[in-house]
Image: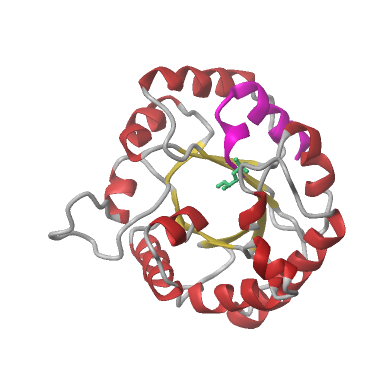
């Protein structure tokens, strides 16, 4: 099969006021024929304004509710993200799974909501350090993947992001062999679950300009989900250039 087109996605998490849009215009203006798709997921408050200035950069949300509307104070529907100019939404990030006790079933429902609204669902999975130390990383991640995979998932509407919880924001990453082992297993699992061997598999967890090229060179790594290093145009642009 042809390799899926690389996706470099940035997750701003709970960072960014209007002034931070200057980083987006700097990134946009510095892009020269990027060899990949690019996505930025700011806080919901910035989706519409970012979409106005992003140019070829796709914009997305960081979470959505499973319902299209209703009495859910503080939540945001996938349809609202699409209405604001979004093209994608992250679901099941480990910070959501931990801070809001989100289950695989809820993540699956959110991903299906994303599809209902015409958004690409970026479904996050990843093991804790204790799970890796116990030799359970593959079981945990493949189990999350199976239980979180939305019905109707295709290579076009769904992306899987492997993010070892212990690597997020820590400056630590798995070895390249460990990333390859997990991504090879995810390639097989996503093919088994969806019938497609072209679903994009992103690596996330302390991806930086200094390590992006070697991680992105792994055959079954089809991009990155970048947190801290997506906040500055120079850093994110360097990762995009490494793709
Ligand atoms: O969604 C992004 C990930 O949690 C990675 O964050 P990080 O690049 O700051 O480690």
Q: Which x, y percent locates residue 122?
A: 52, 57
| Direction from residue 77 to residue 182 in the image, left or right | right
Image quadrant holding the C terminus, namely: top right
Q: Is residue 237 magenta?
A: yes
The stretch in magenta equals 226-243
Q: Residue at x 63, y 74 (%)?
A: 140
Q: Residue at x 34, y 40 (%)?
A: 44
- Asked if 243 appears above or below 156 in the picture, the reply is above
**In the rendered picture of this protein, how many numbered marks are placed on residues?**
0
Q: Which x, y percent locates residue 41?
A: 47, 41
| Direction from residue 29 to residue 239 in the image, left or right | right
Q: Quadrant of residue 206?
A: top right
Q: Which x, y percent locates residue 211?
A: 80, 39
Secondary structure mostly taken by the magenta-highlighted segment of the chain? helix
Q: Residue at x 45, y 61 (%)?
A: 97
Q: Which x, y percent locates residue 57?
A: 53, 34
Q: Residue at x 51, y 57 (%)?
A: 94
């Amino acid at each position: 099969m042809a390799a899926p087109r690389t996706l470099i996605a940035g997750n701003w998490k709970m960072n960014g006021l209007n002034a931070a849009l200057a980083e987006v215009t700097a990134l946009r203006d510095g892009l020269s024929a990027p060899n990949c798709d690019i996505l930025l997921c700011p806080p919901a408050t910035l989706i519409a304004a970012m979409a106005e200035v992003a140019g070829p950069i796709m914009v997305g949300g960081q979470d959505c509710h499973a319902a299209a509307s209703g009495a859910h104070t503080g939540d945001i529907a996938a349809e609202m993200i699409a209405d604001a100019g979004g093209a994608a939404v992250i679901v099941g990030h480990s910070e959501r799974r931990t801070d809001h006790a989100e289950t695989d079933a809820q993540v699956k429902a959110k991903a299906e909501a994303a599809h209902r609204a015409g958004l690409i669902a970026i479904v996050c999975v990843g093991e804790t350090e204790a799970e890796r130390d116990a030799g359970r990383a593959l079981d945990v991640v493949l189990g999350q993947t199976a239980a979180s995979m939305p019905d109707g998932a295709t290579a076009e509407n769904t992306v899987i992001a492997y993010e070892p919880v212990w690597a997020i924001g820590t400056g630590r990453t798995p070895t390249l062999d460990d990333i390859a082992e997990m991504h090879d297993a995810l390639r097989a699992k996503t093919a088994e679950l969806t019938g497609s061997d072209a679903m994009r598999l992103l690596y996330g967890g302390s991806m930086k300009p200094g390590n992006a090229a070697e991680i992105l060179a792994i055959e079954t790594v089809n991009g990155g989900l970048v947190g801290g290093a997506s906040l500055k145009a120079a850093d994110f642009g360097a990762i995009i250039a490494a793709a």
